[in-house]
Image (tube, rainbow, N blue to C red):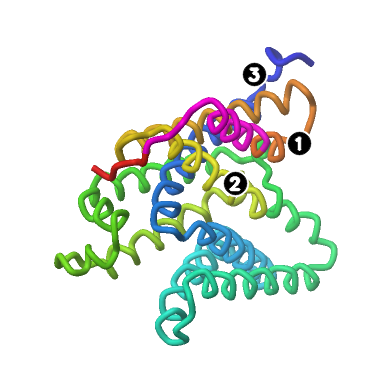
Amino acid sequence: MNLTDWLHLPLMQRALWAALAGGAGCGLLGVLIVGLRIPFIGVAAAHGAMAGAVAGHLLGVSPVAGAFAGSCLAVWLIGPLIETSRQEHELAVGIVFSTMLGLTFLGMSLAGGEINRLLALLWGSILLLPPDRLVWMSGATVLVIALIVGFYPGLRALLVSRKLAAASGLRDAFLMGLVLTVVGLSVAVYLEALGGLLIFAVLIAPAATARLFARSLPALFVASAALGAGGCLAGVLLSAWWNVGTGAMVIVVLCAAFFVVLIFRRREATRYD
């Protein structure tokens, strides 16, 4: 079967739409989490979503609802953990990530014959998504866009300096909590398509690449979204053409784009204006 034949299949059309929505949404979120210096929040949220989905399966409730709950719980734990334990942000994220990872594999060990189905959460199954998941993914991307457009001045101030933003009267704690909540919800939605082990690269690589050449914050958002969507689309198409793993191909494409831009383009510092 050649690539043209693949493009006529409904499963491939759904995969391409999921790649477009998920890649763009993750690219936009990546600008925020990289700019706020919390890159591993995506990993913590993804593993929280996996733990929640596994718990939902074991308890006989919707794994999707469990993923939402687990992802939001993971990101909401980080702030209080920093305040109460006086840990560095990276250490707090690492503790939450490790906890959620342990709970995920503990739940999988209790799943018995259903473990193969749950293992799909690690790698993603973008080619096997049901149509309703596309609606959820599109909605999550719209939510991310609404966050950026609706709170752009505050987000720009946070990206410059959270301390200065707080000193200027901005409700930085509220805005930071809102960002973390949107990250948690979005990662839970994207999890089934992109996979808990691979979603980190889709969150980080487009933003890291865009920062090499974008000279303003609006340009950074647009470039990162385009790179995320384009990289995911290219990865899906190349995986079908060469008959290799889709998730792995997406990651290779996104990371290859970073190194190509790094080699051929020198960056001026991005201005958050």
Q: Nearer the viewer, residue 166 or 76?
A: 166
Q: Earlier in the sequence, mark 2 or mark 3?
A: 3
Q: What residue sits 24% from the left and 52% below the top?
A: 151
Point out which mark residue 213 bears: none
Occupied quadrant, residue 5: top right
Q: Is residue 216 above or below residue 165?
A: above
Q: SS at mark 2?
A: helix
Q: Which residue is mark 1?
A: 245
Name the residue at 53% across, 42% down. 132
- Pointer 1 and pointer 2: residues touching (CB < 8 Å)? no
* Span colored in magenta: 252-268
Q: Residues within 10 Å of mark 1 (few under 14, many from 20)?
A: some
Q: Amino acid at mark 1?
A: Gly
User: Label 2 amino acid?
Assistant: Ala
Distance CA(mark 1)–CA(mark 2): 15 Å
Is the Cβ of the residue at disc 1 closer than 8 Å to that at disc 3?
Answer: no
Tag 2: Cα neighbours inside 10 Å, few (<14), some, or many (≥20)?
many
Which residue was labeled with disc 3?
7
Give the quarter of the image for residue 19. top right
Tell me if 88 is positioned left or right of 220 in this view: right
Q: Residue at x 53, y 29 (%)?
A: 261
Residue 141, compared with residue 263, is above or below; it is: below
> Which is more toward the observer, 223 or 134?
223
Q: Is residue 260 magenta?
A: yes
On whether residue 70 falls in the magenta region, the answer is no
Q: Is residue 9 above or below residue 187?
A: above
**How many numbered discs?**
3
